[in-house]
Structures are given as C-alpha cells and as structure tokens.
Image (cartoon, rainbow, N blue to C red):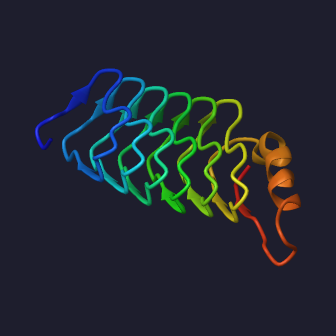
C-alpha cells in the first residue's frame, strides 16, 4: 500500500494471512488499526505521525516495528503484542491511556521526547528492564508503582534503568 496516506477506523482486523506490511507514506490512522492479526511479524510505517485508539493490539507475532516519526498516540497503543521486545519511538510526545500494556516480551523502551502520558501507562510489562524517558515530568512520582511492581516480579540480578531529568 505505497500510496496510502490516511486510513479511517477498523482497518485490517482479524487477518490470519497477513505477515508483513509496508506503508511508507501513511501519516495518520483512525481507531482499531491492525488488531488481532496473529501472523503479522513485521510492520514499517516510517512517516506515520498520529494514531487513534486501539492501535496494534493483540498481534502476537509482531517482532519488529518502525515508526520513527510518530508524535501522538491515542488510548490502547500496542497492547498484548507478545513478540515485541524492543521499541524506540524517538519523536513521540503524547500518548493516551493504556500505552504499551501487557507486552510480555518487551524488555526495552526508548521514548526520549515523551512529555505527556495517560493513565495505566506501561502496565504489566513484566520483562521491561530498560526505560528511557528523559523529558517526562515527575517521572518518579508518576511511575514509582509501575517500576516497583516490575522490579518485584524480577530476579535480583535484573535492574530497571530509568533515566530522567525530572
């Protein structure tokens, strides 16, 4: 879909055949985008800047995701994607609630420009060991319970690294 720049809601749901998707010119999506696609392993959307709610939920096979220009994400962004281990969203500034919840394999998250986050941010990502969010205000206050819960479920040899200027 090389010429697609914008999609509405309920796009490619429950597709068992889809394994790879390249959308080089996509800029914006509505809600319910690419959910419940068990075979999807790779997704490239280099020009995507804004996504609606329920974006990429329950795609168990997704292991690689590139969205370097994403600025804003709605609620329920990347929930229950078991295969995703690392994620770098260098230009993301704002996210809604339930951002990156229940991603069992996620070990590393880098969101260096994030300044605003909704409720239930990073909920139940038990494997998370590296978290980079230097611009998010009040990091310790906002995330102490989340970080404590993740640490308590880890073996003592693992360390969560949190870098912040707040």
Residue beneath the point at 36% across and 51% down:
40
In the foreground, 73 or 82: 82
Write down the quadrant of residue 130 in the picture: bottom right
Please state the horizontal and vertical placement of residue 68, each as a whole percent of the image.
37, 52
Count of marks, rendered view: 0
Vertical placement of residue 16 versus 96, above or below? below
Residue 104 at x, y = what percent? 64, 55
Drawn side of residue 132 relative to residue 146, left or right: left
Q: Which residue is drawn at 33% across and 38% down?
A: 15
Residue drawn at the location 80% of the way across and 56% of the way down? 150
Q: Relative to residue 31, is residue 159 depicted above or below?
A: below
Q: In which quarter of the image is the N terminus?
A: top left
**Which residue ends up furthest to the bottom in the rendered image?**
157
Horizontally, residue 88 falls left or right of residue 4, namely right
Vertical position of residue 131 compared to residue 9: above or below: below
Residue at the extreme top of the image, as rendered: 9
Please state the horizontal and vertical placement of residue 12, each as a whole percent of the image: 31, 33
């Amino acid at each position: 879909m090389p010429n697609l720049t914008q999609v509405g809601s309920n796009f490619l749901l429950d597709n068992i055949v889809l394994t790879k998707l390249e959308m080089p010119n996509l800029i914006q999506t509505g809600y319910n985008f690419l959910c419940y696609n068990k075979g999807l392993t790779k997704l490239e959307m280099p020009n995507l800047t804004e996504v609606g709610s329920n974006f990429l939920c329950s795609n168990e096979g997704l292991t690689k995701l590139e969205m370097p220009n994403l600025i804003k994400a709605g609620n329920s962004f990347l929930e229950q994607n078991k295969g995703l281990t690392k994620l770098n969203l260098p230009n993301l500034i704002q996210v809604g609630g339930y951002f990156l919840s229940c991603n069992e394999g996620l070990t590393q998250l880098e969101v260096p420009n994030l300044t605003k986050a909704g409720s239930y941010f990073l909920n139940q990502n038990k494997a998370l060991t590296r978290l980079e969010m230097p611009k998010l205000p009040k990091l310790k206050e906002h995330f102490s319970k989340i970080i404590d819960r993740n640490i308590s479920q880890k073996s003592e040899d693992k360390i969560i690294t949190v870098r912040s200027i707040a």
